[in-house]
Structures are given as C-alpha cells and as structure tokens.
Image (cartoon, grey):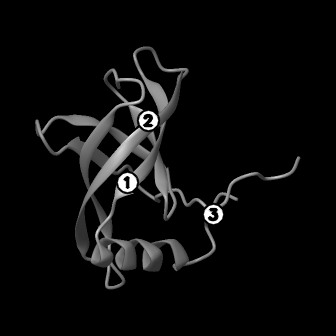
Amino acid sequence: MNEKRRRTRKRPEMALAVTDAMTGAVVGSIGNLSQEGMLLLAERPIAEDALYQFQFDLPDTQGRPYRFEVGAHELWSEAASSTGRSWVGFRFIDLGPEDARVLAAWLADDADTDT
C-alpha cells in the first residue's frame, strides 16, 4: 500500500490531553501529530468543518513541557471503537513560528514515527 500523506506523523509516548482554549474543557487526546495537523481521539462531539482553538503540551528538546495554542480546522471524523469517542483529523491553520520550531524539533526527535 502506498502512503499518501505529505508529512510524517508521530505518536506521543504518553497520553497528551487537548483542551479547547475557549472553554477550558478537555476535548480528547492526541493520536498523532505532524507539522501540518493532528489526529485527535475526541471524547466529546466535534462539529463538522468547524474551526477550533486548541491547547496542548509537548516536551521541548530539554524535556520541559511546552504549551502550544493552535488554530485547527476539522477535516474528517469517524467513530472509534470506544463508545462515545471518535477519531478526528485536523489541519493546523494557525501555528506560531516558535510553536512550529518546537513542533519540528519534537517530530525530528528519534525515529518513532507513523509514515
């Protein structure tokens, strides 16, 4: 099977909660990340074709938590095997330059990626 993704994705080694920056509510956890977007395991309904402002923490190159705040556009979703959860694909539409740098370093750290 040929891979059609433009960017390599990486799974976090631990559960990383994603919070709606507007409400403070946890919406789910990261399934994987790329420079262009993320796969979210959503614990609550996500509106189709909607825009969101999310926050999540990733370790920086020294292992310290680094807070990301990203604008994201919902591209697709499908039911997960867990009742009430869904897999949701998002494209980043607003990622600051420092956030992009830290994310690129995190993605490049080790070879544990999904291609």
Q: Nearer the viewer, mark 2 or mark 1?
A: 1
What residue is pinned by disc 2? 41
Residue 26, position as x, y percentages in the image = 22, 37
Q: Is residue 100 left or right of residue 4?
A: left
What residue is pinned by disc 1? 93
Residue 111, position as x, y percentages in the image = 63, 74
- SS category of the residue bearing label 3: loop
Q: Residue at x 46, y 76 (%)?
A: 104
Give the CA separation, mark 3 to mark 2. Answer: 18 Å
Mark 1 Cα-neighbour bin, 10 Å: few <14, some 14–19, many ≥20: some
What residue is pinned by disc 3? 8
Give the CA separation, mark 2 to mark 1. Answer: 19 Å
As drawn, 80 above or below 2: above
Discs 1, 3 touching: Cβ within 8 Å: no
Q: Answer with the quarter of the image where residue 83 lies.
A: top left
Mark 3 Cα-neighbour bin, 10 Å: few <14, some 14–19, many ≥20: some
Mark 2 Cα-neighbour bin, 10 Å: few <14, some 14–19, many ≥20: many
Q: Residue at x 36, y 83 (%)?
A: 61
Name, please, the residue furthest toward the left.
Answer: 23
Counting every numbered tag in the picture gives 3
As drawn, 6 above or below 86: below
Q: Residue at x 25, y 47 (%)?
A: 54
